[in-house]
Amino acid sequence: MKSLDEILSEQPTDLPQPAAKPTPADDDQDYLCPICGGTGYLRQDVPVGHPQFGKLAKCTCRLRELEDKRLDRLRSISNMKLMERFTFDAFAPDGIGLTDERRRNLRFAYETCLDFANHPHGWLILLGGYGCGKTHLAAAIANHQIEQGNPALFVLVPDLLDHLRGTYSPTSNVTYDQRFEDIRTASLLILDDLGSHNTTPWAQEKLFQLFNYRYNAQLPTVVTTNHELEEIDRRIRSRIIDPDLSRIMTILAPDFRQSGVAQGISELSSLTLHADQTFETFDMRQHELDRDKAENLNRAYLFARNFAAHPKDWITFTGTYGCGKTHLAAAIANERVRSGEPALFVVVPDLLDHLRSTYSPNSLASYDKRFDEVRKSPLLVLDDLGTHSATPWAEEKLYQLFNYRYNARLPTVITMAKDVDLKPRLKSLILDVGRCTPFEILAPSYRGLPTRNQPKPTRRRAAPAHR
């Protein structure tokens, strides 16, 4: 048998690199590698006593074959065939109907992802709500790399875990070790929707092993999630937030897949029913109230207007039914929507009904998505707190909602009657004057009374009595 040096000396001197060497045609069954003669292995030309003496080395043709098989295994768990339409050209980097701030944010996210697609390095973490465009951008990165001839693995996190579980089946044609190795060593890995999986100990352990390996190996990775970083397993979070490795991008755009969201109105909101309740139509009742109550109502009006211009933390309007608190709350939401910002206005009992309806098999929205839309709303107006049925489930959901917005310091407007009996832990959040400004409206109900736009009825003179 010829030595390796003899074989190589017979080859043309301008042979291309191994990865670009000609491969056999699909119908050429007699093709033999000119280097190994079809054996797939070569004996290494080293002196006796060398550690590699007598050991076989894989030929480049064999290495290419193994790499092709590995890529085939990756393609079998990637759904990029279904994601081919998600490209940078198909993405609208300026959005539709967005405010200047959100438009700038979305374009910056687009440019950041495009830069990463051209030069994959480190980790890119895309945060944002449902439908904001993060999955599109992540898939665009994968498609861009594939167009350049580079492999990329795009996989939904729950699907990834299912693929790993599937290797335990006796009928699986790939072992767990082989599948896990293919995933964790992928040259570019894109994990979509982190946090949407069932957080079993096994799942958390596998994900940590995956993240930890790629963290130590500094392998390019893209992660998308609609969860806050604080909600992610702290071991994984410690890898994600490393500033030397990760770029974290929060996308502020609303859900592009829901009509009306860009205008700040979702299917949950009942703001359209209060479209006429604006600051311009608010009745100051100057000719009806005494001085103290009129001044109090004027302060409530000015306070609401200031909040609408610069929403920050919480405000709570209390007072009797019909005193004007719902009108002012709706006026705040209408003012924000008119300026192009999203706002969600919902009556508390209606909100709980919406959440309950997601448990129905016919529901088009999951509970997680519906609840997430409410708790992360840039401005949330909760009308008539305390009029709901105080079941343990309802109290638990409200506490989760209030606690999240309290910790995130998201602008929130609450209206409720003066003497509402709330659970202590909910009341503790609302009464925290460091986060919430309470305002009691002293005016009585004006429902059924004439407004400033209506002339007061003239009093008829009584007819003289007949004696």
Image (spheres, rainbow, N blue to C red):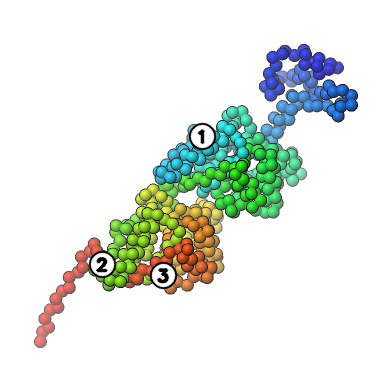
x 67%, y 54%: residue: 200
Name of the residue lying farthest toward the bottom: 467
Name the residue beneath numbered marker 1.
88
Q: Which mark is residue 350?
A: none
In three-dimensional space, the C-alpha distance between marks 1 and 2, rounded to whole angstroms, equals: 58 Å
Among numbered discs 1 and 2, the one appearing first in the sequence: 1
Marks 1, 2: nearer the viewer: 2
Which amino acid type is marked by label 1? Phe
Disc 1 element: loop
Quarter where residue 192 is shown = top right
Label 1 near label 3: C-beta < 8 Å? Answer: no
x 62%, y 49%: residue: 237
Disc 2 element: loop
Marks 3, 2: nearer the viewer: 2
> Within 10 angstroms of label 3, few (less than 14), some, or many (20 or more) residues?
some
Among numbered discs 3 and 2, the one appearing first in the sequence: 2
Residue 81 shows up from this direction: no
Which amino acid type is marked by label 3? Ala
Most foreground residue, 246 or 74: 246
Name the residue beneath numbered marker 3.
417
In three-dimensional space, the C-alpha distance between marks 3 and 2, rounded to whole angstroms, equals: 23 Å
The percent coordinates of residue 130 (x first, y second) are 52, 48
Horizontal arrangement in the rendering, residue 158 relative to residue 412 (left or right) = right
Name of the residue lying farthest toward the right: 49
Most foreground residue, 318 or 449: 318
Name of the residue lying farthest toward the front: 244
Name the residue beneath numbered marker 2.
286
> Within 10 angstroms of label 2, few (less than 14), some, or many (20 or more) residues?
some
The percent coordinates of residue 292 (x first, y second) are 30, 71
Which amino acid type is marked by label 2? Gln
x 33%, y 68%: residue: 296
x 33%, y 71%: residue: 444
